[in-house]
Image (cartoon, rainbow, N blue to C red):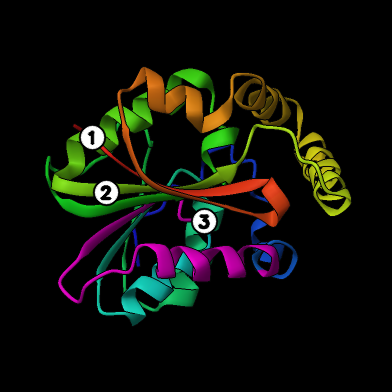
Amino acid sequence: MPRIDKSISSDPYRKFAGWYDTLVEPFLKNLRTEAEKILPTRNDSRVLDVGCGTGSHLGRYARDGATAFGLDRSPSMLTEAAKKLSGRCCLTQGDAGRMPFRSGAFDLVQITMALHEMAPALRSAMLDESRRVLANGGRLLVIDYAWGPVRSKVGRILRWLSFSVEFIAGDAHYKNYRQFMSNRGLENLVARHHLKVFRQVDTWYGNITITVVGFP
């Protein structure tokens, strides 16, 4: 069981964590499956899931034989993850901008649908920290919103649905989402941080991308 500070008053998931797997995880399941096809892990891989939430992706990595670590700031989400994973993964409460791990510790760092909700400064710090904790040749896997236009009717409906969900999530969350989208999303961050894109796959009718990047 991880050491969790439940006294954090700014936990936005306090009332939502217990319902997260019921309400949100069905929409993410296929994204996780596709990501594993794009970038499978080896039995000896060391994987860090940043913003691990309730631990669904961590459980999949552990199932495939990887040594899996999860980092999340929310004590409520980590409590749910601990129940689900039953000690199969190492869970740590902490900040994505100051990761409590040694340099070069991981072969893969992944972040799913969390980059867009971070403040701009934290996004950049998260990428810098990912560079630090990745071993030589390691990869960063990002699953998040695509910023460009969508052309199909289904794509536009899903864009509207995404917009609505982010709006409901609260002022700060919505503000960060809008900033992420208006600044060309991950594409802008790739250019600013001089990342190399190894593969990028569009899904959700052009609304979400699964991107594998590395650090020169």
Q: Earlier in the sequence, mark 2 or mark 1?
A: 2
Q: Earlier in the sequence, mark 3 or mark 1?
A: 3
Report the disc number at residue 79: none
Residue 90, placed above or below residue 8: below
Residue 184 locus on image (x, y percent): 59, 24
Residue occupied by mark 2: 139
Type of amino acid at the residue the image marks with label 3: Gly
Identified at 30% across, 31% down, the residue is 98
Q: Quadrant of residue 195?
A: top left
Nearer to us of marks 3 and 2 is 2
Direction from residue 112 to residue 12 in the image, left or right: right
Type of amino acid at the residue the image marks with label 2: Arg
Question: Mark 2 touching mark 1, by CB under 8 A?
Answer: no
Residue 117 locus on image (x, y percent): 59, 34
Direction from residue 58 to residue 146 in the image, left or right: right
Could you tell me if residue 7 is visible in this image? yes
Q: Find the magenta span and give its range.
A: 26-52
Badge 2 marks a residue whose secondary structure is strand
- How far, Cα to Cα, is label 3 from label 2? 21 Å
Report the disc number at residue 215: 1
- How far, Cα to Cα, is label 3 from label 1? 25 Å
